[in-house]
Amino acid sequence: MGILSFIFGGGNIGLIAKSIAGHHKRLGDFNDVLKIYESDFRSRPVGSRRYDKAKYALGLIEKREIKNYRDLAVLALVVDAAPSNQHFHEVARDFSSKLTKYLADHGVDSAHITGNVLK
């Protein structure tokens, strides 16, 4: 049953959208949710399988390029699911529309999905 839930729940895209929406509902502030993901990326051990991707993600966060939940969802896909040669803009191009839909389906308002909510 787990694989069916994964497939019909949207796979990695659905899981990430559900996680972000849950944090948003609980915390209500984009910057607080961003800090959770930033902390997760910082905690990756040097030399681990996804360390380089996490370091890349931290660079985008520090440059303030992650401005909304769709950007954050793309970043989470880059770090935890995308092949190692795929970076933010490629993943965004391929998955932004699905991420937008799933985030909205999980109750995130459009201003937080596509607007600039960085403070």
Image (cartoon, rainbow, N blue to C red):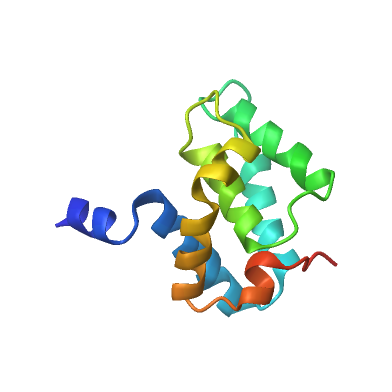
Residue 67 in which image quadrant: bottom right
Above or below, 51 against 102 in this view is: above
Decide if residue 63 is on the left or right side of residue 95.
right
The residue located at (77%, 37%) in the rendering is 59
Q: Residue furthest left?
A: 1
Q: Position of residue 47 (x, y in %)?
A: 59, 20
Location of the C terminus (image quadrant): bottom right
Whether residue 9 is visible to the viewer of this picture, yes or no, is yes
Whether residue 45 is visible to the viewer of this picture, yes or no, is no
Q: Position of residue 107 (x, y in %)?
A: 50, 79
The residue located at (66%, 78%) in the rendering is 28
The residue located at (51%, 57%) in the rendering is 97
In front here: 97 or 45? 97
Decide if residue 8 is on the left or right side of residue 10.
left
Q: Residue furthest top?
A: 47
Decide if residue 66 is on the left or right side of residue 4.
right
Q: Position of residue 64 (x, y in %)?
A: 83, 50
